[in-house]
Image: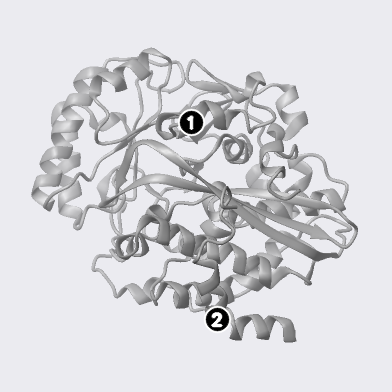
Amino acid sequence: MDRRNFIKNGSLLAAGSSLMLGTMHGCTTNTATDSAENKVDATVRSKSSFVGIPGEKKIKITETDANFEREDLIRPFGFKGGAMREIWQTAALVGSETGIRKFGICTQNVLWSDPAVFEVQSESAGNSLMYNITTRALQMIKGETFSNPVQLQEDILDELWEYGKKITGNTDLKETFILNALVGVDNALWLLYCAENGITNFDDMIPLSYRPALSDHHEKVASIPLMAYNIPVNEIKEAVDEGYFFMKIKIGQSGTQEEMVQKDMARLTEIHNAIGNATTTYTESGKLPYYFDANGRYEEKETMQRFLDHARKIGAFDQIAIIEEPFAEEKKFDVRDLGVRIVSDETAHTDKHALERIQMGYTAIALKPIAKTMSMSMKVAQLAYEHNVPCFCADLTVNPILIEWNKAVAARLGAFPGIKGSLGLVESNGHQNYKHWDKMLTYNPTADCSWAKVEDGVYNLNDDYYARSGGIFEQSAHYAEWFG
Protein backbone atom coordinates (compact mmCIF):
# COMPACT_ATOMS: atom_id res chain seq x y z
CA MET A 1 0.00 0.00 0.00
CA ASP A 2 3.04 2.34 -0.28
CA ARG A 3 1.65 3.61 -3.60
CA ARG A 4 -1.65 4.62 -1.98
CA ASN A 5 0.15 6.46 0.84
CA PHE A 6 2.32 8.27 -1.68
CA ILE A 7 -0.75 9.38 -3.63
CA LYS A 8 -2.47 10.51 -0.44
CA ASN A 9 0.49 12.60 0.71
CA GLY A 10 0.80 14.20 -2.71
CA SER A 11 -2.89 14.70 -3.32
CA LEU A 12 -2.98 18.48 -3.12
CA LEU A 13 -0.22 18.82 -5.69
CA ALA A 14 -2.15 16.46 -7.94
CA ALA A 15 -5.27 18.54 -7.42
CA GLY A 16 -3.47 21.69 -8.46
CA SER A 17 -2.23 20.20 -11.70
CA SER A 18 -5.64 18.71 -12.56
CA LEU A 19 -7.40 22.04 -11.98
CA MET A 20 -5.31 23.53 -14.77
CA LEU A 21 -7.59 21.46 -17.06
CA GLY A 22 -4.70 19.98 -18.97
CA THR A 23 -6.71 16.89 -19.95
CA MET A 24 -9.72 18.76 -21.32
CA HIS A 25 -11.33 17.03 -24.29
CA GLY A 26 -10.87 19.28 -27.27
CA CYS A 27 -7.91 20.83 -25.42
CA THR A 28 -8.37 17.11 -24.40
CA THR A 29 -39.13 15.25 15.13
CA ASN A 30 -38.82 18.53 14.66
CA THR A 31 -35.82 20.74 15.02
CA ALA A 32 -32.91 21.41 12.76
CA THR A 33 -29.60 19.95 13.85
CA ASP A 34 -26.05 20.99 13.16
CA SER A 35 -25.10 19.98 9.61
CA ALA A 36 -22.12 18.00 10.84
CA GLU A 37 -24.51 15.57 12.50
CA ASN A 38 -25.88 14.67 9.09
CA LYS A 39 -22.53 13.28 7.98
CA VAL A 40 -21.53 9.67 8.29
CA ASP A 41 -18.45 9.41 10.49
CA ALA A 42 -15.81 8.13 8.09
CA THR A 43 -13.99 6.35 10.89
CA VAL A 44 -16.97 4.20 11.84
CA ARG A 45 -18.56 3.40 8.49
CA SER A 46 -19.52 -0.26 8.66
CA LYS A 47 -18.97 -2.51 5.69
CA SER A 48 -22.20 -3.98 4.38
CA SER A 49 -23.05 -7.64 4.51
CA PHE A 50 -22.77 -8.45 0.85
CA VAL A 51 -23.08 -11.39 -1.53
CA GLY A 52 -22.06 -10.88 -5.15
CA ILE A 53 -22.36 -13.59 -7.77
CA PRO A 54 -20.98 -17.14 -7.44
CA GLY A 55 -17.41 -17.61 -8.63
CA GLU A 56 -16.43 -13.97 -8.95
CA LYS A 57 -12.94 -13.54 -10.36
CA LYS A 58 -10.19 -11.48 -8.78
CA ILE A 59 -9.54 -8.62 -11.20
CA LYS A 60 -6.35 -6.54 -11.16
CA ILE A 61 -6.61 -3.01 -12.56
CA THR A 62 -3.51 -2.14 -14.56
CA GLU A 63 -4.70 0.85 -16.62
CA THR A 64 -6.83 3.93 -15.93
CA ASP A 65 -7.58 7.10 -17.86
CA ALA A 66 -10.15 9.89 -18.00
CA ASN A 67 -11.37 12.67 -20.26
CA PHE A 68 -14.32 15.05 -20.62
CA GLU A 69 -16.19 17.47 -22.84
CA ARG A 70 -18.59 20.34 -22.21
CA GLU A 71 -22.18 20.31 -23.43
CA ASP A 72 -24.03 23.63 -23.66
CA LEU A 73 -27.57 24.04 -22.40
CA ILE A 74 -30.39 25.69 -24.33
CA ARG A 75 -30.91 28.17 -21.54
CA PRO A 76 -29.62 28.61 -17.96
CA PHE A 77 -31.01 25.76 -15.87
CA GLY A 78 -31.97 27.26 -12.52
CA PHE A 79 -32.67 25.53 -9.22
CA LYS A 80 -31.38 25.62 -5.63
CA GLY A 81 -30.59 29.32 -5.96
CA GLY A 82 -28.14 28.87 -8.85
CA ALA A 83 -28.13 28.25 -12.57
CA MET A 84 -26.05 26.00 -14.80
CA ARG A 85 -25.10 27.01 -18.33
CA GLU A 86 -23.22 23.89 -19.35
CA ILE A 87 -22.86 20.30 -18.19
CA TRP A 88 -19.63 18.33 -18.29
CA GLN A 89 -19.73 14.82 -19.67
CA THR A 90 -16.82 12.75 -18.39
CA ALA A 91 -15.56 9.28 -19.16
CA ALA A 92 -13.38 6.98 -17.05
CA LEU A 93 -11.46 4.03 -18.44
CA VAL A 94 -10.25 0.96 -16.55
CA GLY A 95 -8.21 -1.89 -17.94
CA SER A 96 -7.24 -5.22 -16.41
CA GLU A 97 -4.12 -7.33 -16.63
CA THR A 98 -5.95 -9.62 -19.06
CA GLY A 99 -6.06 -6.78 -21.58
CA ILE A 100 -9.76 -5.96 -21.30
CA ARG A 101 -10.52 -2.19 -21.36
CA LYS A 102 -13.88 -0.64 -20.53
CA PHE A 103 -15.04 2.92 -20.00
CA GLY A 104 -18.01 4.42 -18.19
CA ILE A 105 -19.77 7.75 -18.71
CA CYS A 106 -20.70 10.37 -16.11
CA THR A 107 -22.79 13.54 -16.27
CA GLN A 108 -21.55 15.98 -13.64
CA ASN A 109 -23.88 18.25 -11.67
CA VAL A 110 -22.13 20.33 -9.03
CA LEU A 111 -25.19 22.48 -8.26
CA TRP A 112 -27.35 19.45 -7.51
CA SER A 113 -24.74 17.44 -5.61
CA ASP A 114 -23.49 20.28 -3.37
CA PRO A 115 -24.77 23.85 -3.89
CA ALA A 116 -22.17 25.13 -1.39
CA VAL A 117 -19.40 24.21 -3.82
CA PHE A 118 -21.28 25.75 -6.76
CA GLU A 119 -21.86 29.00 -4.87
CA VAL A 120 -18.21 29.75 -4.09
CA GLN A 121 -16.67 28.64 -7.39
CA SER A 122 -17.06 29.63 -11.00
CA GLU A 123 -19.05 27.04 -12.91
CA SER A 124 -15.93 25.70 -14.61
CA ALA A 125 -13.96 25.59 -11.36
CA GLY A 126 -16.68 23.62 -9.62
CA ASN A 127 -16.80 21.15 -12.47
CA SER A 128 -13.02 20.81 -12.50
CA LEU A 129 -13.07 20.00 -8.78
CA MET A 130 -15.56 17.20 -9.35
CA TYR A 131 -13.54 15.93 -12.32
CA ASN A 132 -10.47 15.93 -10.08
CA ILE A 133 -12.31 13.55 -7.73
CA THR A 134 -12.79 11.23 -10.69
CA THR A 135 -9.11 11.27 -11.62
CA ARG A 136 -8.10 10.84 -7.99
CA ALA A 137 -10.31 7.74 -7.71
CA LEU A 138 -8.65 6.29 -10.78
CA GLN A 139 -5.24 6.91 -9.20
CA MET A 140 -6.37 5.10 -6.08
CA ILE A 141 -7.62 1.96 -7.83
CA LYS A 142 -4.83 1.54 -10.37
CA GLY A 143 -2.80 -1.50 -9.34
CA GLU A 144 -5.50 -2.74 -6.98
CA THR A 145 -7.30 -6.08 -7.19
CA PHE A 146 -11.06 -6.31 -6.68
CA SER A 147 -13.80 -8.93 -6.78
CA ASN A 148 -16.85 -6.67 -7.07
CA PRO A 149 -17.43 -2.95 -7.78
CA VAL A 150 -19.61 -2.59 -4.65
CA GLN A 151 -16.81 -3.66 -2.35
CA LEU A 152 -14.21 -1.62 -4.21
CA GLN A 153 -16.36 1.49 -3.79
CA GLU A 154 -16.68 0.80 -0.05
CA ASP A 155 -12.89 0.49 0.17
CA ILE A 156 -12.17 3.92 -1.35
CA LEU A 157 -15.20 6.07 -0.54
CA ASP A 158 -14.16 7.43 2.86
CA GLU A 159 -10.63 8.30 1.78
CA LEU A 160 -11.95 9.93 -1.37
CA TRP A 161 -14.46 11.95 0.65
CA GLU A 162 -11.70 13.30 2.88
CA TYR A 163 -9.72 14.21 -0.23
CA GLY A 164 -12.76 16.03 -1.62
CA LYS A 165 -13.08 18.08 1.55
CA LYS A 166 -9.47 19.18 1.18
CA ILE A 167 -9.56 20.26 -2.43
CA THR A 168 -12.92 22.04 -2.12
CA GLY A 169 -12.04 23.62 1.23
CA ASN A 170 -15.46 22.44 2.46
CA THR A 171 -15.37 20.32 5.62
CA ASP A 172 -19.12 19.71 5.24
CA LEU A 173 -18.85 18.48 1.66
CA LYS A 174 -21.85 16.34 0.77
CA GLU A 175 -21.07 12.72 0.04
CA THR A 176 -23.20 12.94 -3.08
CA PHE A 177 -20.53 15.20 -4.60
CA ILE A 178 -18.12 12.28 -4.38
CA LEU A 179 -20.65 9.74 -5.63
CA ASN A 180 -21.52 11.92 -8.63
CA ALA A 181 -17.82 12.03 -9.53
CA LEU A 182 -17.64 8.23 -9.25
CA VAL A 183 -20.46 7.38 -11.68
CA GLY A 184 -18.22 6.91 -14.71
CA VAL A 185 -15.63 4.99 -12.70
CA ASP A 186 -18.28 2.73 -11.20
CA ASN A 187 -19.92 2.05 -14.58
CA ALA A 188 -16.53 1.21 -16.08
CA LEU A 189 -15.82 -1.18 -13.23
CA TRP A 190 -19.17 -2.92 -13.72
CA LEU A 191 -18.48 -3.36 -17.43
CA LEU A 192 -15.00 -4.69 -16.71
CA TYR A 193 -16.38 -6.98 -14.01
CA CYS A 194 -18.98 -8.36 -16.42
CA ALA A 195 -16.46 -8.90 -19.20
CA GLU A 196 -14.07 -10.72 -16.87
CA ASN A 197 -16.87 -12.92 -15.48
CA GLY A 198 -18.56 -13.67 -18.80
CA ILE A 199 -21.72 -11.69 -17.94
CA THR A 200 -23.64 -10.20 -20.85
CA ASN A 201 -26.96 -9.34 -19.19
CA PHE A 202 -27.93 -6.77 -16.57
CA ASP A 203 -29.98 -9.30 -14.59
CA ASP A 204 -26.96 -11.57 -14.22
CA MET A 205 -24.83 -8.59 -13.18
CA ILE A 206 -26.99 -7.78 -10.14
CA PRO A 207 -25.37 -9.10 -6.95
CA LEU A 208 -27.38 -11.77 -5.14
CA SER A 209 -27.78 -9.41 -2.18
CA TYR A 210 -29.75 -6.93 -4.27
CA ARG A 211 -31.80 -9.14 -6.59
CA PRO A 212 -34.98 -9.09 -4.45
CA ALA A 213 -35.28 -5.32 -5.05
CA LEU A 214 -34.59 -5.56 -8.79
CA SER A 215 -36.58 -8.58 -9.90
CA ASP A 216 -39.37 -7.06 -12.01
CA HIS A 217 -39.40 -6.80 -15.81
CA HIS A 218 -41.87 -4.02 -16.61
CA GLU A 219 -43.44 -3.85 -20.05
CA LYS A 220 -43.28 -0.06 -20.03
CA VAL A 221 -41.41 2.71 -18.24
CA ALA A 222 -43.03 6.12 -17.99
CA SER A 223 -40.86 8.99 -19.15
CA ILE A 224 -41.04 11.82 -16.61
CA PRO A 225 -40.24 15.26 -18.07
CA LEU A 226 -39.14 18.17 -15.89
CA MET A 227 -41.17 21.36 -15.75
CA ALA A 228 -38.97 24.10 -14.32
CA TYR A 229 -40.19 27.42 -12.94
CA ASN A 230 -39.98 29.14 -16.33
CA ILE A 231 -41.92 26.54 -18.31
CA PRO A 232 -45.26 28.09 -19.29
CA VAL A 233 -48.37 26.22 -18.19
CA ASN A 234 -49.50 25.89 -21.79
CA GLU A 235 -46.35 23.81 -22.47
CA ILE A 236 -47.26 21.56 -19.54
CA LYS A 237 -50.68 21.09 -21.10
CA GLU A 238 -49.05 20.33 -24.46
CA ALA A 239 -46.95 17.63 -22.80
CA VAL A 240 -50.13 16.06 -21.42
CA ASP A 241 -51.66 16.16 -24.89
CA GLU A 242 -48.55 14.32 -26.19
CA GLY A 243 -49.17 11.49 -23.72
CA TYR A 244 -46.95 12.43 -20.78
CA PHE A 245 -48.88 11.79 -17.61
CA PHE A 246 -46.35 11.88 -14.77
CA MET A 247 -44.44 15.16 -14.77
CA LYS A 248 -41.93 16.60 -12.34
CA ILE A 249 -42.84 20.18 -11.50
CA LYS A 250 -40.48 22.48 -9.64
CA ILE A 251 -41.76 24.41 -6.63
CA GLY A 252 -39.79 26.34 -4.02
CA GLN A 253 -39.47 29.45 -6.13
CA SER A 254 -37.22 32.44 -5.49
CA GLY A 255 -37.73 35.05 -2.81
CA THR A 256 -38.54 35.04 0.87
CA GLN A 257 -40.43 32.12 2.33
CA GLU A 258 -43.68 34.10 2.08
CA GLU A 259 -42.98 35.10 -1.52
CA MET A 260 -42.04 31.51 -2.33
CA VAL A 261 -45.19 29.91 -0.99
CA GLN A 262 -47.41 32.52 -2.63
CA LYS A 263 -45.74 31.86 -5.99
CA ASP A 264 -45.98 28.10 -5.50
CA MET A 265 -49.67 28.26 -4.61
CA ALA A 266 -50.39 30.42 -7.64
CA ARG A 267 -48.41 28.01 -9.85
CA LEU A 268 -50.35 25.04 -8.48
CA THR A 269 -53.64 26.80 -9.21
CA GLU A 270 -52.60 27.52 -12.80
CA ILE A 271 -51.47 23.95 -13.38
CA HIS A 272 -54.56 22.40 -11.81
CA ASN A 273 -56.86 24.64 -13.84
CA ALA A 274 -55.04 23.58 -17.01
CA ILE A 275 -54.67 19.81 -16.52
CA GLY A 276 -56.69 18.89 -13.44
CA ASN A 277 -59.44 17.30 -15.52
CA ALA A 278 -57.11 15.36 -17.81
CA THR A 279 -57.33 11.58 -17.58
CA THR A 280 -54.91 8.68 -17.94
CA THR A 281 -55.20 4.91 -18.02
CA TYR A 282 -52.00 4.55 -15.98
CA THR A 283 -53.35 5.54 -12.56
CA GLU A 284 -55.92 3.85 -10.35
CA SER A 285 -57.85 7.12 -9.99
CA GLY A 286 -57.78 7.86 -13.71
CA LYS A 287 -56.44 11.34 -12.95
CA LEU A 288 -52.97 12.72 -13.53
CA PRO A 289 -50.57 12.34 -10.59
CA TYR A 290 -48.80 15.52 -9.47
CA TYR A 291 -45.08 15.25 -8.70
CA PHE A 292 -43.62 18.34 -7.03
CA ASP A 293 -39.93 18.90 -6.28
CA ALA A 294 -39.01 21.63 -3.81
CA ASN A 295 -35.23 21.00 -3.71
CA GLY A 296 -35.16 21.71 0.03
CA ARG A 297 -36.47 25.28 -0.26
CA TYR A 298 -39.12 25.05 2.48
CA GLU A 299 -37.66 26.04 5.85
CA GLU A 300 -40.58 25.02 8.06
CA LYS A 301 -43.25 22.36 7.99
CA GLU A 302 -45.90 25.01 8.55
CA THR A 303 -45.04 26.63 5.23
CA MET A 304 -45.34 23.33 3.40
CA GLN A 305 -48.65 22.73 5.20
CA ARG A 306 -49.93 26.03 3.78
CA PHE A 307 -49.13 24.78 0.28
CA LEU A 308 -50.94 21.52 0.98
CA ASP A 309 -53.93 23.31 2.50
CA HIS A 310 -54.17 25.38 -0.66
CA ALA A 311 -54.11 22.17 -2.71
CA ARG A 312 -57.07 20.91 -0.66
CA LYS A 313 -58.91 24.18 -1.16
CA ILE A 314 -58.70 24.01 -4.96
CA GLY A 315 -59.33 20.25 -5.17
CA ALA A 316 -55.80 19.27 -6.17
CA PHE A 317 -54.65 17.53 -3.00
CA ASP A 318 -55.80 14.03 -3.91
CA GLN A 319 -53.77 14.19 -7.12
CA ILE A 320 -50.47 14.90 -5.34
CA ALA A 321 -48.61 11.61 -5.75
CA ILE A 322 -45.29 12.77 -4.29
CA ILE A 323 -43.45 15.80 -2.98
CA GLU A 324 -39.70 15.47 -3.29
CA GLU A 325 -37.26 17.02 -0.83
CA PRO A 326 -39.42 19.79 0.66
CA PHE A 327 -36.85 20.50 3.38
CA ALA A 328 -33.12 21.04 3.47
CA GLU A 329 -30.99 18.16 4.66
CA GLU A 330 -30.28 19.66 8.07
CA LYS A 331 -34.02 20.04 8.76
CA LYS A 332 -34.65 16.67 10.34
CA PHE A 333 -38.41 16.96 10.52
CA ASP A 334 -40.68 13.99 10.98
CA VAL A 335 -42.96 14.22 7.94
CA ARG A 336 -45.59 11.59 8.79
CA ASP A 337 -48.23 14.21 9.62
CA LEU A 338 -48.12 15.99 6.23
CA GLY A 339 -50.55 13.51 4.71
CA VAL A 340 -48.73 13.04 1.39
CA ARG A 341 -45.93 10.79 0.19
CA ILE A 342 -42.64 12.60 0.86
CA VAL A 343 -39.65 11.52 -1.23
CA SER A 344 -35.97 11.61 -0.39
CA ASP A 345 -33.56 12.30 -3.23
CA GLU A 346 -30.35 14.23 -2.59
CA THR A 347 -30.64 13.69 1.17
CA ALA A 348 -30.34 9.94 0.61
CA HIS A 349 -26.64 10.11 -0.16
CA THR A 350 -26.01 6.53 0.91
CA ASP A 351 -27.96 3.61 2.35
CA LYS A 352 -27.31 4.97 5.86
CA HIS A 353 -28.86 8.34 4.97
CA ALA A 354 -31.77 6.62 3.23
CA LEU A 355 -32.52 4.68 6.41
CA GLU A 356 -32.48 7.93 8.42
CA ARG A 357 -35.07 9.43 6.08
CA ILE A 358 -37.26 6.34 6.23
CA GLN A 359 -37.19 6.60 10.02
CA MET A 360 -38.32 10.25 9.68
CA GLY A 361 -41.42 9.20 7.74
CA TYR A 362 -40.22 9.53 4.14
CA THR A 363 -42.20 6.96 2.17
CA ALA A 364 -40.42 6.86 -1.20
CA ILE A 365 -36.89 7.25 -2.51
CA ALA A 366 -35.77 8.68 -5.82
CA LEU A 367 -32.90 6.49 -6.93
CA LYS A 368 -30.16 7.97 -9.08
CA PRO A 369 -27.84 5.32 -10.50
CA ILE A 370 -26.68 8.05 -12.89
CA ALA A 371 -25.75 10.40 -10.03
CA LYS A 372 -24.87 8.28 -6.98
CA THR A 373 -23.44 5.25 -8.85
CA MET A 374 -25.04 1.96 -9.74
CA SER A 375 -23.29 0.32 -6.76
CA MET A 376 -24.79 2.68 -4.18
CA SER A 377 -28.20 2.78 -5.87
CA MET A 378 -28.59 -0.99 -5.80
CA LYS A 379 -27.68 -0.92 -2.12
CA VAL A 380 -30.30 1.79 -1.41
CA ALA A 381 -32.90 -0.03 -3.52
CA GLN A 382 -32.49 -3.18 -1.44
CA LEU A 383 -32.72 -1.22 1.81
CA ALA A 384 -35.93 0.43 0.63
CA TYR A 385 -37.33 -2.94 -0.48
CA GLU A 386 -36.70 -4.42 2.96
CA HIS A 387 -38.61 -1.49 4.53
CA ASN A 388 -41.48 -1.66 2.01
CA VAL A 389 -40.60 1.80 0.67
CA PRO A 390 -41.20 2.22 -3.09
CA CYS A 391 -38.56 3.68 -5.41
CA PHE A 392 -38.35 5.21 -8.85
CA CYS A 393 -35.48 6.69 -10.86
CA ALA A 394 -34.87 10.42 -11.12
CA ASP A 395 -32.69 12.19 -13.66
CA LEU A 396 -29.65 14.45 -13.45
CA THR A 397 -30.14 15.88 -16.96
CA VAL A 398 -27.94 13.07 -18.21
CA ASN A 399 -26.89 12.09 -21.71
CA PRO A 400 -28.75 9.44 -23.78
CA ILE A 401 -26.43 6.59 -22.78
CA LEU A 402 -26.97 7.22 -19.07
CA ILE A 403 -30.73 7.28 -19.58
CA GLU A 404 -30.39 3.58 -20.38
CA TRP A 405 -28.40 2.90 -17.19
CA ASN A 406 -31.17 4.65 -15.25
CA LYS A 407 -33.90 2.84 -17.15
CA ALA A 408 -32.25 -0.53 -16.43
CA VAL A 409 -33.02 0.01 -12.75
CA ALA A 410 -36.43 1.64 -13.24
CA ALA A 411 -37.57 -1.32 -15.35
CA ARG A 412 -36.82 -3.75 -12.51
CA LEU A 413 -38.13 -1.91 -9.43
CA GLY A 414 -41.43 -2.92 -7.87
CA ALA A 415 -44.60 -1.18 -8.99
CA PHE A 416 -45.14 2.32 -7.58
CA PRO A 417 -48.30 2.82 -5.47
CA GLY A 418 -51.24 4.19 -7.42
CA ILE A 419 -49.77 3.25 -10.80
CA LYS A 420 -51.59 0.61 -12.89
CA GLY A 421 -50.08 -2.15 -14.97
CA SER A 422 -46.52 -3.27 -15.48
CA LEU A 423 -44.99 0.18 -15.45
CA GLY A 424 -41.74 1.65 -14.11
CA LEU A 425 -40.95 5.34 -13.63
CA VAL A 426 -37.87 7.18 -14.88
CA GLU A 427 -37.30 10.92 -15.17
CA SER A 428 -35.62 12.08 -18.38
CA ASN A 429 -35.20 15.77 -19.18
CA GLY A 430 -32.04 15.95 -21.30
CA HIS A 431 -34.05 16.55 -24.46
CA GLN A 432 -35.54 19.64 -22.81
CA ASN A 433 -32.23 21.19 -21.82
CA TYR A 434 -29.25 20.28 -24.03
CA LYS A 435 -28.55 22.54 -27.00
CA HIS A 436 -27.12 19.67 -29.06
CA TRP A 437 -29.35 16.82 -27.91
CA ASP A 438 -29.86 15.43 -31.40
CA LYS A 439 -26.09 15.14 -31.84
CA MET A 440 -25.72 13.54 -28.43
CA LEU A 441 -28.24 10.89 -29.47
CA THR A 442 -25.82 9.74 -32.17
CA TYR A 443 -23.29 8.85 -29.45
CA ASN A 444 -25.66 6.16 -28.17
CA PRO A 445 -25.26 2.96 -30.21
CA THR A 446 -28.87 1.91 -29.49
CA ALA A 447 -30.54 5.29 -30.03
CA ASP A 448 -32.51 4.00 -33.03
CA CYS A 449 -34.04 1.08 -31.14
CA SER A 450 -37.76 1.41 -30.50
CA TRP A 451 -37.29 0.93 -26.76
CA ALA A 452 -34.95 3.94 -26.61
CA LYS A 453 -37.68 6.29 -27.84
CA VAL A 454 -40.64 7.76 -26.00
CA GLU A 455 -44.07 6.97 -27.44
CA ASP A 456 -47.16 8.51 -25.86
CA GLY A 457 -45.20 9.32 -22.73
CA VAL A 458 -43.66 5.88 -22.16
CA TYR A 459 -40.77 3.68 -23.22
CA ASN A 460 -42.09 0.35 -24.52
CA LEU A 461 -39.78 -2.44 -23.40
CA ASN A 462 -39.84 -5.64 -25.43
CA ASP A 463 -37.87 -8.89 -25.34
CA ASP A 464 -35.08 -7.30 -27.37
CA TYR A 465 -34.70 -4.59 -24.72
CA TYR A 466 -34.13 -7.11 -21.94
CA ALA A 467 -31.96 -9.35 -24.11
CA ARG A 468 -29.66 -6.41 -24.87
CA SER A 469 -29.98 -4.81 -21.40
CA GLY A 470 -30.87 -1.50 -23.00
CA GLY A 471 -27.53 -1.46 -24.78
CA ILE A 472 -25.46 -0.60 -21.70
CA PHE A 473 -22.86 -3.22 -22.59
CA GLU A 474 -22.37 -1.70 -26.07
CA GLN A 475 -19.56 0.86 -25.87
CA SER A 476 -20.00 4.19 -27.67
CA ALA A 477 -17.67 4.93 -30.58
CA HIS A 478 -17.74 8.64 -29.71
CA TYR A 479 -16.30 8.15 -26.23
CA ALA A 480 -14.05 5.29 -27.32
CA GLU A 481 -12.16 7.77 -29.52
CA TRP A 482 -11.05 9.59 -26.38
CA PHE A 483 -8.91 6.66 -25.32
CA GLY A 484 -7.45 5.38 -28.60
Q: Circle 2 is placed at which residue position?
A: 44
Q: Residue 436 — which label? A: 1
Judge left or right: residue 479 versus residue 250: right
Task: Quadrant for residue 5, please give it.
Answer: bottom right
Residue pictured at 82% horizontal, 40% vertical: 200
**Most foreground residue, 43 or 412:** 43
Q: How is the image coloured?
A: one colour
- Is residue 382 at least partly visible in the picture? no
Residue pictured at 57% horizontal, 75% vertical: 14
How far apart marks 2 and 1 lie (CA) works out to: 45 Å
**Most foreground residue, 84 or 246:** 84
Does dot 2 land on a helix, a strand or a loop?
loop
Report x, y in % for residue 152. 70, 67
**Most foreground residue, 425 or 102:** 102
- Under mark 2, the amino acid is Val
Relative vertical location of residue 460 with respect to residue 387 in this rendering, above or below: above
Mark in the foreground, 2 or 1: 1
